[in-house]
Amino acid sequence: GASVLASAELGPDSADKRPSVQVGDPLTEKLVIEASLELVAKSIISGLQDLGAGGICCPASEMAAKSGTGIRIDLDAIHLREPGMAPFEIMISESQERMLAVVAAERAPEALEVCRAWELEARVVGEVTNSGLVEVVVSGETAASIPAAALASQAPLLSRPAVRPEGLDVVRAGPCGDDPHEDLGGCLLALLASPGGASARWIWEQYDHMILLGTVLGPGGDAAVIRLPGSAAAVALSLDGPGRLCHLDPYEGARLAVAEAARNVACTGARPAAVTNCLNFGNPEKPEVMWSFQEALRGIADSCSALGLPVTGGNVSFYNETLGRAVHPTPVIGMLGVLEDATAAVGVAFRAGGDVLALLGLTDPDDFGGGAYAAVINGALGGSPPHLDLEREGALHRLLAQAAAQRLLSSAHDLSGGGLAVALAESALAGGLGFRLTAAEPVVERHRWLFSESPSRALVSLAPENLDRLRAAAAALGVPMTPLGEVGGDTLDCGGFEVALAEAAAAHATHPFGPPTAF
């Protein structure tokens, strides 16, 4: 399974390990969810836990330890996809779409009938005991017996050495990639066609995101918004993982990851409410990797504390290395937001010609370290990440929620990879409408104004009659606001250069890793 694969480095002979990563089946997952909800609603079960990392070993030991009981698992009763599996493989297999339920013996037939109604395989695979042990039975013989608490909560704690990487100062002292280029239109097209900037439509179209008709804002924007059944409210969901920024400074990069995920949710009008994570790092037995891990955790904690966000859970993936070379420290942040009125949700797409464009937040012309312009245009990874002011970030979130609730905005889009220029292009492409910048000529080089990746900023469009109300709300919250121009036409007119909307669309539709193939 994935947790086993994530506990070993990959090398030249690792190709045969790749099939051990399970493939999810969203439709079966939906059936499992519905069956589980029915079992709970009918009070048929007394305990329920999913089978994730560690396979059946994990929920069996955790449920037994939490309840102060034991559990006996009969591996011969577990249905297998492949014959000839060894007992240890059955115990730790991470096949997806599985749950372990605890049911009173007399109600087991009811539980099995519910599962059959949802076209799911289900069997009685063991029993609860009073031994306090997790016992594994194979062919009628006890193959393993270990205290449940030893597996669940009393495992030995490791305190690994952590050392700041020696070469980090050299990297941060290197060029930050802010060199100017004459063809800024070409730079914009290159960013739109890059792996981090190209459309991911061919990926998210693999699954029907309109099932049950609860989707308010679908994939492709800052965050997806899904209406809650039987309620006027909705939830907003986003993911962010800035590996390049964390490579330069894992603490600041992790702070920025939380802030960007929260900003994505806030741009829809939702209030950021909770965080989950997936922490991807190299071999923690190497002190430099462990230091990066600790610093990233510190950054996540500081941002969550400042923004009032609880961390509901997450997972850690270590040993992401090939031939001794680790991935960039990459904490991926999942953010959930709450929108009290789903009809107030705001998308990234420009909606109407003649709408006013405005920039919320401050731009630092030197914020290029670890950015998309630096990486794609200048091939650089150096300097320091942008500085994050969490008070400004929180104020921007409150302004966006207030403006959405008052129906002031036609669109809102966070500024991150590629800065203002890419945000403008993405909103134009999403809405099929161009724009024209009419703001005063910046006092800095134009590429710094267009491609800087300063945090705590958002691009909004709105009807001209709403401009004064938004300006007053921004002033009340201390959020700088700069009118930029207007929506309309079929070109991306950035003042000093123009790009045809059709040309930008063609670049954005590029598949940077080659033509897509069916999953």
Image (cartoon, grey):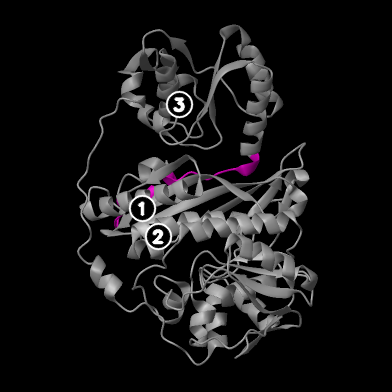
Segment colored magenta: 9-27
Q: In this rendering, which labeled residue sits more in front, label 3 or label 1?
A: 1
Q: Which residue is mark 3?
A: 59
Give the residue pinned by disc 2: 253
- In three-dimensional space, the C-alpha distance between marks 2 and 1, rounded to whole angstroms, equals 7 Å
Q: Earlier in the sequence, mark 2 or mark 1?
A: 2
Query: Could you tell me which quadrant the N terminus lies in?
Result: top left
Tell me where residue 193 appears, x and y as whole percent: 55, 75
* Disc assigned to residue 296: 1
Against 506, residue 346 (above or below) is above
- Is 303 covered by the magenta stretch? no
* Residue 411 picture location, percent across and down: 70, 65
Quadrant in which residue 316 is drawn: top left
Tag 2 and tag 1, C-beta contact below 8 Å: yes
Looking at the rendered structure, the secondary structure element under dot 2 is helix
Q: Earlier in the sequence, mark 3 or mark 2?
A: 3
